[in-house]
């Protein structure tokens, strides 16, 4: 059974790992974690830790680690699918059916009929007349048979002509592929459709690459081209029935955009009216057994095929296609729906930094605010969101035409980070030169930061950044030697910089806490991490107060800490909160790699050695991705 990654993520998110593991292991809350004796090796002193906020367990002894799924697989010696079935059932999530059931869902019964002739293409003038009478409704009543001339076949396309016998059972994916080929074959027969793509500046190569096509204005062209597959067409929602019981095709006299899933299979269609007076301008296939709008992005398959690295969410199909033609391969669009959590998670799996394009008008600002509120809960540490605000009356295609591709790419790279966008958004309606205005901005910011992950550092960093921009109070400044250097010298280790960052930015502890599983207890950094683990939940929200709180908790190491603060000049290195977070993440990864390699030199057992190598491989990939980005 193939289980999509987004389903796996949902199951893990809805499973409380502490509750799950406490059924097998006696756990005791110690600081931010829960600890107990490891169930995977014999021990007397607890070295097994469970992190509720990260949905993760780790044994400091044998190095066993993973999420709830891995725990059940290892402790019960069960396979992945069996564990997923149990956890999904407990979480109330429906898993995809197995191959046999899935085949039944996408299969339909075919009838033995020969394709019928299709009405000849209408002239552009006739198209306009038909559009005016059609009124662009899904539920219009189709005309009677004598209103259309069926004397000539519209095209030579016949997907079944090569078959000696008509199959008695069809599947929806094959039918969708045949329909896509049919629509492609109709494009040369409509000058209006060809002119539309030409006016939008698309080359023949681009039209072929995206498999663009045309749906004839004949009300029943699909039934005539695929008479054996009417049941399948109904399952896909491409045939509708009027109140009078007459069947008609959903997409008529429209240019067609085939929509492909992550595997490249055609799963649906988007249709754009050729007359702007027809409403709605765009119509998409309805959801079906193979087509789920909320789980798909137009252009994702094509972007991955082109090995896109930077990803940009835009408004419509034509924006995606035009950008790809200009060499910007990572553009995607939703399928006629507003962006949602699923869409953003899909993109975050492609890259930890994504950009969203919005129009600069009031409607665009409203959409940006809505997307912001959806995105904030997803911004775990390491994820970045940028906002590319387009000038009024411009889409990406028109902006490239005006600015040129080089200037467009420069503007795209300069798109503001979420922190800058939020600051501009919240301060545009308040006078930040007054205490009242600053108070209003901070109140609105708190409403947004409450949406961020509770234990992530971004919540703290965003608030601190706003306070600095608004000129709140004074910043805590350690007493430093005037000769302190900004450079990393041979007398200062990575551990020292980690200690300095933690003293000045205690909330960044979340980057370093996993180091406790690898470090020697006599290390100063290890002792400080233990103290932070115990007091983290009691830290004051204000950075200055939090710093003094930590200094007090670590007073027994005051002399060593003072020496480190003097040598590192950490405040100058981390003047911007974003830089502090970046440095903390880099030092944490570097130190974790160092300690993993040290432990691998003398593992206590084969099991520990295997676990350490697995972690080192995963860590190496993570470091490589950061270097690339």
Image: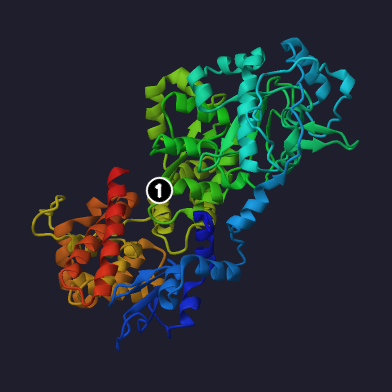
| Residue 157 appears in the rendering | yes
| Residue 223 percent across, percent down from the top left | 76, 31
Label 1 environment density (alpha carbons within 10 Å; few <14, some 14–19, many ≥20): many
Front-most of residues 164 and 478: 164
- Relative to 175, does residue 372 appear above or below in the rendering? below
Measured as percent of width and height from the top left, residue 489 is found at 10, 54
Q: Position of residue 510 (x, y in %)?
A: 35, 64
State the colouring used for the structure image. rainbow
**In the drawing, does residue 604 fall left or right of residue 97?**
left
Q: Is residue 144 above or below residue 308?
A: above
Q: Is residue 391 visible?
A: no
Classify 135 as above or below 26: above
Q: State the SS at label 1.
A: loop
Considering depth in this image, is 315 or 482 the residue closer to the camera?
Answer: 315
Which picture quadrant has residue 96? Answer: bottom right
Q: Nearer the viewer, residue 426 or 117?
A: 117
Image side of residue 391 versus residue 488, left or right: right
Q: How many marks?
A: 1
For the view shown, which residue lies furthest in the left direction?
490
Q: Left or right of 4: which side holds 109?
A: right
Residue reaching furthest front?
164
Q: Position of residue 14 (x, y in %)?
A: 54, 66
Which residue sits at x=77%, y=12%? 126
Which of the pair 469/273 is nearer the observer? 273
Q: Residue at x 23, y 51 (%)?
A: 573
Residue hosting label 1? 352
The C terminus sits in image quarter:
top left
For image coordinates 56% across by 18% down, the residue present is 200
């Amino acid at each position: 059974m193939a289980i999509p990654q987004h389903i796996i993520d949902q199951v893990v998110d809805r499973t409380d790992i502490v509750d799950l593991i406490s059924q097998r292991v006696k756990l005791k809350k110690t600081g931010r974690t829960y600890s107990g004796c490891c169930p995977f090796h014999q021990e007397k002193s607890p070295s097994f830790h469970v992190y509720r906020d990260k949905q993760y367990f780790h044994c400091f002894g044998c190095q066993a680690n993973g999420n709830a799924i891995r725990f059940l697989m290892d402790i019960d010696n069960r396979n992945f699918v069996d564990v997923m079935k149990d956890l999904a059932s407990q979480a109330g999530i429906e898993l995809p059916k197995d191959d046999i059931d899935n085949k039944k869902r996408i299969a339909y019964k075919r009838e033995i009929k020969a394709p019928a002739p299709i009405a000849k293409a209408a002239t552009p003038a006739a198209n306009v007349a038909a559009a005016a009478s059609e009124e662009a409704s899904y539920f219009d009543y189709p005309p009677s048979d004598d209103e259309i001339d069926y004397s000539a076949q519209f095209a030579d396309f016949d997907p079944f002509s090569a078959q000696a016998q008509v199959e008695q059972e069809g599947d929806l994916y094959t039918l969708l592929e045949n329909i896509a080929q049919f629509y492609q074959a109709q494009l040369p027969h409509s000058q209006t459709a060809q002119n539309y793509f030409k006016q939008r500046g698309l080359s023949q190569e681009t039209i072929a690459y995206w498999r663009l096509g045309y749906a004839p204005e004949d009300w029943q062209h699909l039934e005539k081209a695929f008479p054996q597959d009417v049941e399948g067409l109904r399952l896909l929602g491409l045939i509708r029935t009027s109140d009078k019981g007459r069947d008609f095709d959903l997409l008529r006299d429209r240019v067609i955009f085939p929509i492909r899933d992550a595997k490249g299979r055609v799963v649906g269609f988007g249709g754009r009216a050729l007359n702007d007076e027809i409403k709605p301008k765009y119509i998409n296939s309805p959801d079906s057994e193979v087509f789920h709008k909320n789980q798909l992005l137009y252009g994702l398959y094509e972007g991955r095929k082109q090995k896109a690295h930077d990803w940009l969410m835009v408004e419509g199909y034509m924006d995606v296609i035009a950008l790809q033609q200009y060499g910007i391969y990572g553009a995607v669009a939703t399928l006629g729906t507003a962006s949602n959590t699923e869409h953003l998670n899909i993109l975050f799996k492609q890259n930890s930094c994504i950009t969203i394009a919005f129009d600069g008008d009031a409607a665009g600002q409203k959409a940006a605010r809505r997307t912001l509120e959806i995105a904030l809960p997803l911004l775990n540490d390491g994820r970045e969101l940028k906002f590319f605000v387009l000038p009024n009356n411009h889409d990406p295609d028109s902006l490239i035409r005006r600015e040129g591709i080089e200037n467009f790419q420069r503007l795209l790279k300069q798109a503001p980070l979420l922190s800058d966008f939020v600051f501009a958004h919240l301060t545009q309606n308040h006078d930040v030169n007054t205490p009242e205005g600053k108070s209003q901005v901070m109140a609105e910011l708190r409403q947004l930061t409450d949406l961020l992950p509770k234990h992530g550092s971004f919540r703290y960093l965003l608030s601190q950044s706003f306070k600095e921009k608004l000129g709140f109070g004074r910043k805590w400044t350690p007493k430093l030697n005037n000769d302190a250097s900004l450079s990393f010298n041979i007398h200062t280790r990575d551990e020292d910089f980690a200690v300095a960052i933690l003293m000045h930015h205690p909330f960044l502890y979340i980057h370093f806490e996993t180091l406790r599983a690898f470090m020697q207890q006599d290390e100063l950094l290890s002792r400080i991490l233990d103290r932070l683990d115990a007091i983290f939940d009691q830290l004051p929200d204000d950075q200055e107060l939090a710093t003094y709180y930590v200094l007090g908790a670590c007073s027994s190491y005051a002399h060593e800490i003072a020496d480190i603060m003097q040598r590192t000049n950490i405040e100058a290195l981390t003047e911007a909160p974003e830089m502090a977070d970046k440095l903390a993440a880099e030092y944490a990864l570097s130190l974790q790699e160092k300690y993993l390699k040290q432990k691998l030199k003398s593992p206590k057992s084969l099991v520990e050695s295997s676990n350490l190598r697995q972690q080192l491989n995963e860590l190496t990939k993570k470091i490589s991705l950061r270097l690339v980005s």
